[in-house]
Image (spheres, rainbow, N blue to C red):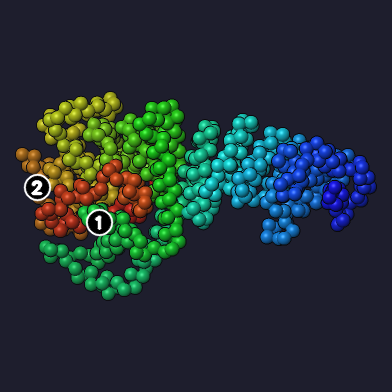
Amino acid sequence: MPAVVPSMTVIDSNSNRTPTPPLSRASSPSIKTIKSALKKSSSIGSDGSLMSSNNLNFSETVYKARVQDALDQLTFHKNANPINHLVAQLEIPSNSSESLTPEKSLYLVKALTSEVSRLDSPSCAPLINAILKMKWTNKNADFVSAYVRFLGVLVSSIPKWWTEVANKVISEFTMKETTAHHSVLSYILKIIPTASSTVSGIFIKNFPHKSDTSKHLVCYVKNLLKTVEYCDELERSVWALIFERTVQLDVELYEELEDEDDDIDDDDDEYDDDDDVDLDQDKDENGTSYTSELAVKLEEESSDDEDDGDDWDDNASDMSEYDVEDHITTDVKSLKRKLDSIITLLFDYLDTKFNAEKLNSPQTVQLFTTLVDLFKAFILSTHRTRSVQYIIFRTCHAHPDLLDAFLVSMIELALSPSENVERRQKAMQYISSFIARAKGLSRAQIIFVVSFLTGWLDRYIREREIEVDNAVGGMGRFKMFYSVSQALFYIFCFRHSILRKTDDVESSSVATPAPSTKRAVSPSSEWECDLDHLFQRVILTKFNPLRYCKHTVVAMFAQIAQKENAAYCFTIIEQNRLGGFRSSSSISSGNISDSGALPSPLSNYSSNSYFGAGNTFWTKSQEFVALEGYFPFDPLMLPKARHYLDGLYVEWEEVAEDFSDGSSDEDDEAENDTDSDESDSDIDMSNDDEDSD
């Protein structure tokens, strides 16, 4: 018998507790255990070492006896010293010569696994915690297997430890290889059904901070999605957490870019003072002088457009509209990289769910419902996200029915009198941008949505135009009207070729709008939904949408509508600029010829003059109203993620090329100035309330 055997009854000499009287060698539990094990199953190995018949070496047998002895000391003699000694050994740093070797750690874990039921004692809690703190993923396969078994046996034998085990496993979701982690977590969720309601909180607790590395963030999100594969109940909470944290990254990136744009503008101002003075003397091509105030405003807007990098440029093919790398700092690039990596990961994951094989499965339908619900909860309610909304954009393109479902949900929200106005406006922004940019939409789908918008505008004008002259309240009362008008202007800029009537079957089979939005359609109109007549009516109303809608959208709409013979806006735009707009009651319809052709722009209307319309007051008695120009599906600025939109996204250059040949300088400037990310103020509703229309 080796001399090491007596040392198995360990008394901590540094402990303050009174040690239990030592047992005799003959009665020592550890000695009995070892003697019994050796007597029954020992043999001499080829290398001369003592081996058991079960292929267990002597050290493993010793550790098993040591654990049994420590637990016997605690159970029969209330002596926790042997347990505490094990804890002390486990807590020795791995780089110390006195720490347990990987082999001995394996033997200890195996020994504890066979005695787990005896660990249900407050005195054993430090030992369990020490085991849970062990680094196990860098060990060999035998150790990992033994450790996973210990965790599983611990949870099944002493369920109260499941939260600590789950926290241990989930905290390591930032690692690349986590197969063993998911084995443990799936086992926990299987034997403790109620755990799914609590594990979501552990997901939140361990989610990496946004300052963590891109690798850790991506690994964590990937592992969260893996949990849904073996626990359906986690789907909604997992996606809610992913949406929430991705939105936070998106918003922070946007704010950082805005701050840097402001810094760049401030730097530029130091060198532009002389130029600003010269603006007083600038004249347009017809010799009309600009006022100093207007010229400065135009110059500032032009500078903002260039800095944002979101211009509607007909050079989009060279990706210049995506180029925002010149001035951004390392921190912003890091944020951008993290967001890009997460969104591309989500694109790839959703591709595995929304494919031909799974598209009609109940699980996929439920996932889409979850995504739309969370879109409304997290994205729709957040001001100016730039990227995360493309998760739903791309997913919808998996099938026409999904495109329909998303649009219907947005229309119901936007035109619902029971929703608050800000939320309705946001939904309308998404409708207009989605219709403009989603290449997967059919002609019938586009016209169907347009029919809803035109019907709503027609009814609104009939019912509420009389309220404009009411001295009580400002024009902010009608901001939903301006939102719908701007949406229709914006859609027309992108989809005018589709909105012109054709003789094909598809045109005649377009779905009929709901009764509440139906309008009488003139057979003489060449536009679907009588758009030309509707536009002319809308722009001549007392609401004066050309004054209150985003001026860059109005400018581009005026150009395209005039060229397509759909509406003529320049007279009102110029009157707005001069502050002398007259409503339909005082504007003659003589601007439209008997043949229906629209006149050419007046010779003294330069692009600068009508672009200035957004910076004047309607009347002195009305408060300033500026409708926000936010179009959520403007070009995606993430370099990897944007390639996932190839074939799904309508670029502005595809539309603008029709207006580039032979266009005037006025046309070019209007295109370049159509920047939907320019930060105009919202409609001031501090003293005005929108009613339920």
Locate residue 434: give its quadrant: top left
Q: Which residue is mark 2?
A: 599
Q: Is residue 524 left or right of residue 141?
A: left
The mark nearer the N terminus, 2 or 1, is 1
Q: Position of residue 667 (x, y in %)?
A: 17, 54
Residues at marks 2 and 1 touching, judged by CB atoms closer than 8 Å: no
Name the amino acid, label 2. Answer: Pro
For image coordinates 24% across by 27% down, the residue present is: 511
Residue 585 visible, this angle:
no
Classify mark 2: residues with Cα within 10 Å, few (<14), some (14-19) or many (20+).
some
Name the amino acid, label 1. Answer: Asp
Q: Position of residue 545 (x, y in %)?
A: 26, 45
Locate residue 122: give its quadrant: top right
234, above or below 176, in the image: above
561, above or below 369, in the image: below
Front label number (2 vs 1): 1
Q: Position of residue 270 (x, y in %)?
A: 34, 73
Q: CA distance from mark 2 to mark 1?
A: 36 Å
Locate residue 587: give its quadrant: top left
Q: Position of residue 686 (x, y in %)?
A: 42, 48
Residue 49 visible, this angle:
yes
Q: Which residue is mark 1?
A: 318
Q: Name the image quarter holding the C terminus.
A: top left
Q: How many marks?
A: 2
Q: Is residue 1 left or right of residue 216?
A: right
Element assignment for label 2:
loop
